[in-house]
Image (spheres, grey):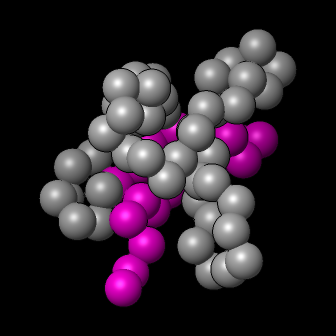
Amino acid sequence: MSKRITVINEDYSGRNLQFRDNYTGAVMSRAEFVRLIEAGVYPNYHVRVINGIKTPASDPDSSEDNNLG
């Protein structure tokens, strides 16, 4: 099974800006993805606050192959 979410755009510092849902083809901004995670649409992801900015993150598990990035 492929990763559900892929990062498709980052800023100069490496902050993830745009995401693709590989199951539906939807493209989301960071803010849109955060809202959907908080609404429970993506149960295997959570939101961290990094430098005051809500940031999507995949839930930890034993695989290093399915992290956002």
Question: In the image, which residues are magenta?
Answer: 1-20
| Residue 20 screen position, x and y as percent | 34, 55
Q: Residue furthest top?
A: 52
Q: Quadrant of residue 16?
A: top right
Left or right: residue 59 compared with residue 18:
right
Residue at 49%, 53% in the rendered image: 44
Q: Residue furthest right?
A: 51
Between 57 and 19, the one nearer to me in the picture: 57
State which quarter of the image contains the N terminus: bottom left
| Residue 66 screen position, x and y as percent | 58, 73
Residue at 78%, 27% in the rendered image: 50
Left or right: residue 44 compared with residue 36:
right
| Residue 64 screen position, x and y as percent | 71, 77
Membership of 39 in magenta stretch:
no
Marker count (numbered): 0
Left or right: residue 23 compared with residue 56:
left
